[in-house]
Each structure stands twice: as structure tokens, then as C-alpha cells.
Amino acid sequence: MAARIHPSILSADFVNLERELARIAGADAVHVDVMDAHFVPNLTLGLPVVRRIAEVSPVPLDVHLMVEDADRWAPQYAEAGAASVTFHAEATQAPVRLARELRAGGVRAAVALRPATPVEPFLDLLDELDMVLVMTVEPGFGGQAFIEGTLAKVRRVAAAVRAARLPTWVQVDGGVTAQTIGRIAAAGADTFVAGSAVYGSDDPGARIDELRAAARPTLRA
Ligand code: DX5
Ligand code: ZN
């Protein structure tokens, strides 16, 4: 199985989103970072923009909500045209209820964990989730350095998914580059968000292929 590469439009030119989306047509999905200036100290885009992105994107939308009160907001992103909606564990009162609501709305449901948030409370609930996002930087900004200590959590999630024989994807977000992706894949991640690594390249399509190739030798079968 090839590694899934999800470029983050956080590092794209926000004034030319349609053109920027066309540059990553070879990706598996586009990662859309929604920030509310409360859950994280940054503000990006919201529902109206996500609706338009869904209309013009050549690839499915992987929406990463970095917003407070996920129970209220996440279902609206499912309706906005996302293929997958990721809410933060720290921003929901009822993760299983929310995941079920998202699935009932026809989208993949995912939970995200900040670097200091343990995955253990979710390990018995993995069949309620289509993806677990292990944040490998503190959410809020692109271009930060990968936090090595998060690899142990990636290993624990991947081991639990394997042990339960579930189809749950293991995603990482933050500091993913051609230099770091090999060892993240070796830890068991299969889905990789890359913002600056893709959009910082003159040829995003070639960089996507390069990242996929760099992940492949160590990716589990
Ligand atoms: C950060 C966002 C990431 C960001 C990653 O809070 O969730 O998706 O775009 O950027 P890079 O790949 O540059 O670390
Ligand atoms: Zn993200």
C-alpha cells in the first residue's frame, strides 16, 4: 500500500486557491486547516471557503478542525463537502457521539491529538474512528520542526490498529519532510500531511511523488 500524501493548503497562496489546488492534483487528498483563533492562536478560513474549495478541488477534502466546540462545528463541515472531518480530542465533549454523527453524515470521522494528549483513552474506541491524527507539532502554524517524541505515540496507535485488525488510518501532521517521512512511516503512519514541504517546492507534484517514495521502503504492508 502506498503512503497517502495530503498537502496542506495552509502553506498555499490563499489568494489563488483554485490554482494552488490544481498544482496538487496528484495528491490523495487536500488537507484543509480550519483555525478559529481560540483553540489555536491563528485564524484561517471557515465554512464558506471550504464549500468553494469542495466545488473546485480535484481531490477529496481532509478537513482538520482546530476550533473549540467541535461538537457544534464539525457536522457542518461534513455538510460543506468534506470527505473526512477531523476534530480535536481536546475540543469535544463527546467524541464517540460526534464520530457517529459524522459517519451518519457520510464522511470519514477522525480524532486529532495534540502532542501532549495521550492516545490511550481512544485505544478501545478505534472502531468508531476512520482515522487518528497524531499531531507531530503543536497545532497552529506551518513550517515548525517535527517533535521526535511524538513517534512513540504513532507506534502505539499503529500497533493498536494492527492488533484489532481495523482499517483505521494513522495520520501525522507537522514537520513532515523528505527527511522525516521515512522514520514516521517506519513508526506505522500511513497518511501524511505536508504543508511547507509540498508548497515550498517549485514543483509540488514532483515533491508529492518524492514524499510517497521516501515513505514506501518502510511502510507496513
Ligand atoms: C498546523 C497544521 C498543519 C500545517 C503543517 O497546525 O495543522 O496542517 O499545515 O505544516 P507543515 O507541513 O509545514 O509542518
Ligand atoms: Zn493540519
Image: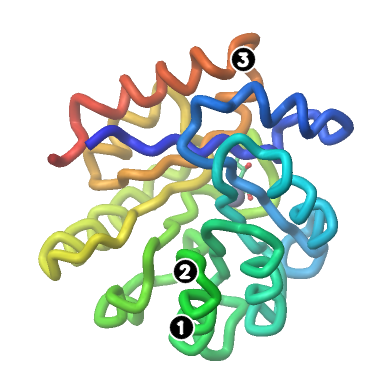
Q: Position of residue 118 (x, y in %)?
A: 39, 71
What residue is drawn where x is 42% and y is 19%?
209
What residue is drawn where x is 37% and y is 31%?
181
Q: CA distance from mark 2 to mark 1?
A: 8 Å
Between disc 1 and disc 3, the foreground one is 1
Q: Secondary structure at mark 3?
A: loop
Q: Quadrant of ligand 1?
A: top right
- Say which quadrant the C terminus sits in: top left
> Amino acid type of disc 3?
Ser
Q: Quadrant of residue 8?
A: top right
The relative height of residue 65 versus residue 142 in the rendered view (above or below) is: below
What residue would you read off at disc 2? 109
Instruction: Classify 10 Å Cα crowding around label 1: few (below 14), some (14-19), many (20 and above).
Output: some
- Tell me whether circle 2 and circle 1 mark residues in contact (CB < 8 Å): yes
State yes or no: Cβ of the residue under disc 1 lies below 8 Å from any atom of ligand 2.
Answer: no
Q: Which numbered disc covers residue 201?
A: 3
What residue is drawn where x is 55% and y is 75%?
105
In primary-sequence order, the first of circles 3 and 2 is: 2
Which residue is nearer to you in this view: 145 or 58?
Answer: 58
Residue placed furthest toward the right = 15
Q: Is residue 111 left or right of residue 50?
A: left
Between disc 3 and disc 2, the foreground one is 2
Q: Which numbered disc covers residue 100?
A: 1
Q: Secondary structure at mark 2?
A: strand
> Amino acid type of disc 1?
Arg
In primary-sequence order, the first of circles 1 and 3 is: 1
Q: Is residue 161 left or right of residue 87?
A: left
> Amino acid type of disc 2?
Ala
Q: CA distance from mark 1 to mark 3?
A: 38 Å
